[in-house]
Image (spheres, coloured by chain):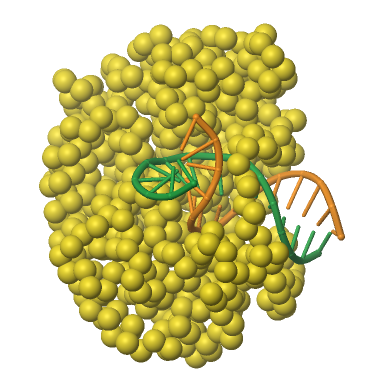
Chain colours: A yellow, B orange, C green
Amino acid sequence: MPQLNGGGGDDLGANDEMISFKDEGEQEEKISENVSAERDLDDVKSSLVNESENNSSSSDSEQAERRPQTRPDSESYEKTRDYFSEALRRQQDGGFFKSPHYPGYPFLMIPDLTNPYLSNGSLSPSARTYLQMKWPLLDVPGSAGLKDSRSPTPGHLSNKVPVVQHAHHVHPLTPLITYSNEHFSPGTPPSHLSPEILDPKTGIPRTPHPSELSPYYPLSPGAVGSIAHPLSWLMPQQGQHMYSIPPGGFRHPYPALAMNPSMSSLVSSRFSPHMVTPPPHSLHQTGIPHPAIVSPAIKQEPSGDINPLSKSPVPAKKEEDKKPHIKKPLNAFMLYMKEMRAKVVAECTLKESAAINQILGRRWHSLSREEQAKYYELARKERQLHSQLYPGWSARDNYGKRKKRKRENKPDSKPEGKGPSKKQCVQYLPSEKMCDSPASSHGSMLDSPATPSAALASPAAPAATHSEQAQPLSLTTKPEGRMQHHFSIPGKASGSTSSSSSSSSSSSSTSSSSQPTISIPVGTSGSQSNTPILTRPIPFTSLHPSMLSPPSPFHQAALHSHHALFQSQPLSLVTKPTE
DNA sequence: AACCCTTTGAAGGGG
DNA sequence: CCCCTTCAAAGGGTT
């Protein structure tokens, strides 16, 4: 059993991942080869910058317009999450976001009836709610955190958080416990939660003064509302998201699971009726399964009105049904993706997930250590939670469920030439603008931690200790796709890290994914096509960092160093399968 | 309808 | 111990 203690213990690899920029090296090399490309790049860069700026400004209005129209379901929810996370970040960073009111409460993702782990489309998995909670409680293993489990003092958050934490001192490791709640239809928001600012029509919390919002990123009305209010900012635009947990408590559908005290406290105690309003609709009060559980029955249900919970998983029909599909817990990056996807999507016209994911991947690498640590911590908690809920579960259990995986395309077996393998060269990067918007998104400010020390100090940032900054790039030279582990933490694996790993897998090096280049339409001036046009491969590195990630002192410095490194020592190998 | 694509990380099995 | 595979999210695109 993993220790929950705030973090210190298992690093979970939080550190290693830090920055890999693997492909950059290759690209860098490429660039040298293509001088002309570079030139174009300049053009592209400038144009991109302009575009992005324009875009950001326009996007605001656009979003404002669009948002109301679009159905605020999972999508909007995602956005909301983004904003939440944003807010969280800001708080943690002690940054600009002023929310003195509830500084110390970490976010808690509350499960909705339909949990995020549900694969069923109708029950969108994405929904997660953040609730502010005292993070340490979550951490506590069993007994410790549960003091209040017995005496749940509903409604008094303050009680639960005796110690007033400063916004600036918020623990970076704020745990997010994810549960979904997307299924909730917009219901009445909790009265205790900023009722006054609820939108009469939608029931969505609104922001009294948009002006308070950070100018740096475009907030959708809903999101704005969420953020604006001290409490409301924790809740998704649709108040309903908050109430994922039935007052009755959390009853695990999965028979085998015994709820661990900490869990129960987490669920029942933390989300007391007071805090969690009863499901507006017909939510099953019976209980909420962990997000990871996917009942087969549910999956089949076409529409959202299902009562997944009502049906006990066990008695169900066949053997298959017996075993609900329990999804894997989300890893740090997945959590990040969920949060940021909507934002990225909003910032650009790009819609393809593949492209979005590329951007997200870039951004992920550009995140500061603290920021990443936060997600690692969250992921760790999710895993812990998951393991507690489903002790016997193994990732292996899900193997084959997806039934896809045909992937005949083996790196070595089929060296090249195949049509399918071609994908390596194709980049989904947004043609028109690198969506990754610059400042608008999580911008510069976020990164500049007002109180970095706090973040670092926290257990959450275990990895931080290292010299990443000092020598972040040592790894860069590694051509391999997955090099992140190379930096890894001392404690964790990778003892071999520093030693040259590159040799390890000669053939596999390029195996899957790393795609160093991105394609940018060279000649597209005004034309805009959402579809990625592949005209000329351009190394990511060549792009200005701002294009791919929010500029921040930290980032820029890091990027700079990276670049410098690369330049100084060009990568030897281009693993890219030619052809 | 199912799968692909794309990203990172975690987990597990095999060598 | 290392490598490889699979899956987690997501949604437009492809088959």
The residue positioned 32% from the left and 87% from the top of the image is A36
The residue positioned 18% from the left and 51% from the top of the image is A59
Residue A386 vs A471, above or below: the answer is above
The residue positioned 68% from the left and 76% from the top of the image is A502
Give percent across and percent down for residue C11: 37, 41
Which residue is more in the foreground, A335 or A173? A335
Give percent across and percent down for residue A566: 49, 84
Which quadrant holds the N terminus of chain A? top right
Residue A468 visible in the shown view: no
The residue positioned 51% from the left and 72% from the top of the image is A23
Give percent across and percent down for residue A429: 36, 62
Query: Is residue A346 toward the left or the right of residue A247 in the image?
Result: left
Residue A168 vs A330, above or below: the answer is below
Query: Is residue A82 toward the left or the right of residue A368 in the image?
Result: left
* Image quadrant in which you'd find residue A379: top right
Residue C1 vs A460, above or below: the answer is below
Residue A397 visible in the shown view: yes
Which residue is more in the foreground, A142 or A257? A257
* Image quadrant in which you'd find residue A136: top right
Q: How many marks?
A: 0
Residue B2 vs A462, above or below: the answer is above
Give percent across and percent down for residue A257: 70, 22
* Image quadrant in which you'd find residue A99: top left
